[in-house]
Image (cartoon, rainbow, N blue to C red):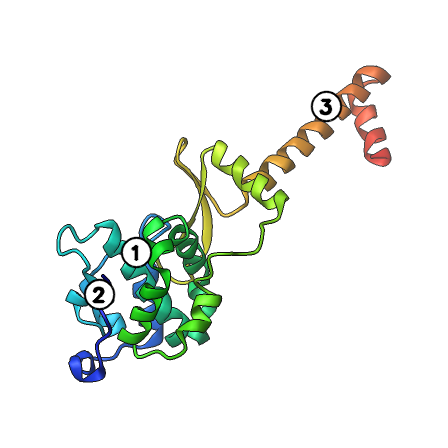
Amino acid sequence: MIMRGASKSNGTSNYASITPENAVDVICRSFRANQSWVPSKALSKCLSVPYQRFLIVTTPKDDLSNLIWTSVLVLVYCATHLVDYHESWYEVADASTAWLRQQQHFVDQREDLVRSACNLLNVGDPDQLLSTLFALVVETPDPAIAEEEAVLLREGWQRCFLNEPPYTAYYWNAETNHSTWRHPLETAQMERELQEKKEKRQALLAKCNLPGMRLEVFLRGVL
């Protein structure tokens, strides 16, 4: 069973408020494995929710049910308290909601979880969140994008996020431990095009059989 929400008289008002910027910082820094949040004192202060209310299971705190419940709480908070900072947290939110849809416990208890989170955070209209942020049916992904993601995974690439502002996405290869801002598939395409151009140039050199320097000048005027 999900713990039902606390009212303002249950002690949440005793928590010192933090700025929205600091809240975004805490939320993005504590995002784990590109999928979920673990109960923590930092999140407790950020959301103004007693730490014990994050725990469905007391130990271990990273029990799957705790991860799911805490992630729902954080996402509800973002969608209702940090609307003006959407650009700073939407990527981690997208990653987390995608992970939640893969968890059977979330699928089975979705309405109860979201309504409980809204109650605990004193948020109205959970139905709107259930039909948008926490909808189980999402738009069918573009086949080209799905194939692109599959290729990235096959080649060992993962999309990650900086753990400090501006929380920009980057790509990390688990096999080579190489990181890059540029999309790996775009880089590979550029390298292929450069290689093809080089091979074409070499083929022209071999075919024309002209002195190298003169041919270089000639090709610059033609290509």
Task: Kindly identify which residue carries mark 1.
Answer: 68
Q: Is residue 85 visible?
A: no
Image location of residue 15, percent across then percent down: 19, 78
Q: Quadrant of the C terminus?
A: top right
36 or 113: which is nearer to us? 113
Label 2 amino acid?
Ala
Reply above or below: 161 against 87.
Answer: above
Residue 213: image quadrant is: top right
Q: Is residue 16 left or right of residue 181?
A: left
**Left or right of 76, for residue 142:** right
- Callout 3 touching callout 1 (CB < 8 Å): no
Q: Earlier in the sequence, mark 3 or mark 1?
A: 1
Q: Is residue 176 above or below residue 121?
A: above
In this picture, residue 82 sits left or right of residue 2:
right
Is disc 3 surrounded by few (<14), some (14 to 19) or many (20+) residues within 10 Å? few
The residue positioned 50% from the left and 48% from the top of the image is: 181
Give the camera-side residue of 42 and 182. Answer: 42
Of pointers 2 and 1, the one earlier in the residue sequence: 2
Of the two numbered discs 3 and 1 in the rendering, the one whose residue sits closer to the viewer: 1
SS at badge 1:
helix
Residue 134 at least partly seen: yes
Amino acid type, mark 3: Glu
The residue at the point 21 percent across, 63 percent down is 54
Disc 3 target residue: 199
Query: Which amino acid, by three-letter code, is at mark 1?
Result: Ile
Q: Locate residue 44 relative to residue 127 in the image: left or right.
A: left
Which of marks 2 and 3 precedes in the sequence? 2
Q: Which type of secondary structure does the marked residue at label 3 adopt?
A: helix
**Residue that mark 2 sits on:** 42
How far apart are the alpha carbons under marks 3 and 2?
57 Å
